[in-house]
Amino acid sequence: MTSRPQVLVVGAGVSGLTTAVRLAESGLRVRVRAEVEPGRSSSAAAGAIWDPVYADHPCVGRWAARSYTVFDELSRSGFPGVRVIEGVEACREPIRSPAWTETLPGYRDCRPEELPAGFASGWRYTAPIIDMPPYLAGLQDRLVTAGGELILGERLRSLGDAFAEAGLVVNCSGVGARELVPDPEVQPIRGQLVAVRNPGLGEFFAEYTEELGEMTYLLPQGDVLLLGGSAEKGAAEFRADARITEAIVGRCAAIFPAVRGAEILGERTGIRPWRPTVRVEHEDLGDRHIVHNYGHGGAGVSVSWGCADDVVAAVTPLIN
Ligand SMILES: Cc1cc2nc3c(=O)[nH]c(=O)nc-3n(C[C@H](O)[C@H](O)[C@H](O)COP(=O)(O)OP(=O)(O)OC[C@H]3O[C@@H](n4cnc5c(N)ncnc54)[C@H](O)[C@@H]3O)c2cc1C
């Protein structure tokens, strides 16, 4: 791109790339700037199962439903990293499934003999599972095909740096928004997963929980099985923690013994950008405009397409 962009997107995680793809495919000249390349962003560490629970905003249900539809289309078209598979969510207590699951394709209550030992209730449904490194690479390719430009490796010190390049900025800086905006409401929640050689699981399994914490889940991605997970509030350390790895493998193996002894291929760690409510919002600064899209906590992949559509709707009337 030789001319000045109409929109500068800050961030090349799942929020920034999805939004930039939508903006570029709507015909705008888009430039993305990010300190960290997509494959090393926190987004690359996500599991990532479609699950609208771990982010808060009145629109989360709508954003997630829209994203489910897009992921379903992407899986049918063979887009890198996108699968829609069946699986089970289960609870050690005898509870009813949450209402949002009951509208999902393939939903039904599990029969007792379908549940692993120690679980008293469970339900099946079909959900998108995204293998993030190839998926982010696919989004990057799609952005370039649509005429978008990507500049990586430089940290913007302020939004002023961004406005020097375009009068319209879309802020998808994840946990970076804490300093960039600045927005003290953004808090880091570190997460770690373990990748093992898949001993043969074809379905996902997740222990039911409504809170980010010590979660137990197994997400099959072909030959790789991702085991989860952890959530350390306030922590922003990318280095893998061997004790967390051991605890995750132990919890998963207690439910699926085949996991014990599976070759460990490595860990994935990232920082969830938690905020009391997701911020998707236009800020009018007179002669300049910013549209924010950050603070998606533990559900940024699950809401990515819905949020991107809302950003496009906010940006379009601002282009003259
Ligand atoms: C272990 C783990 C498991 C998860 N599992 C799931 C899951 O199963 N399902 C799900 O939906 N979600 C999941 N999540 C949450 C999801 O990963 C996040 O919500 C999502 O990745 C946030 O994406 P983002 O693009 O907003 O932020 P990021 O991926 O952090 O991207 C931020 C971008 O902004 C750039 N940036 C920031 N500040 C600056 C600056 N000053 N200058 C230039 N560039 C800047 C960064 O370099 C980066 O490119 C998980 C997260 C983790 C860590």
Image (cartoon, rainbow, N blue to C red):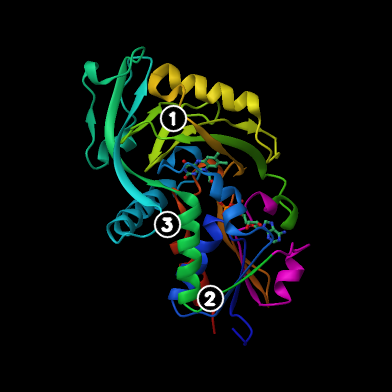
Region in magenta? 153-177
Instruction: Please say if 219 is above or below 77.
Output: above
Q: Residues within 10 Å of mark 3 (few under 14, many from 20)?
A: many
Image quadrant assignment for residue 290: bottom right
Disc 3 marks which amino acid?
Answer: Gly
Disc 1 marks which amino acid?
Answer: Tyr
Q: Residue furthest bottom?
A: 3
Going 36% across and 12% down the picture, which residue do you hit? 118
In this view of the protein, can residue 30 be seen by the observer? yes
User: In the rendered image, which quarter contains the N terminus?
Assistant: bottom right
Image quadrant assignment for residue 120: top left
Q: Work out how far the residue at label 3 is from the one at label 1, CA to CA, in angstroms.
A: 25 Å
Residue 5 percent coordinates (x, y): 61, 80
In front: label 2 or label 3: 2
Q: Are marks 2 and 3 in contact (CB under 8 Å)?
A: no
Q: Nearer the viewer, residue 300 or 193?
A: 193
Query: What residue is shown with label 2?
Result: 148
Q: Is residue 184 left or right of residue 256?
A: right
Disc 2 marks which amino acid?
Answer: Gly
Query: What residue is shown with label 1?
Result: 217
Q: Residues within 10 Å of mark 2 (few under 14, many from 20)?
A: many
Residue 89 percent coordinates (x, y): 35, 28
Query: What residue is shown with label 3?
Result: 306
Query: Circle 1 — which element?
Result: strand
Q: How many marks?
A: 3
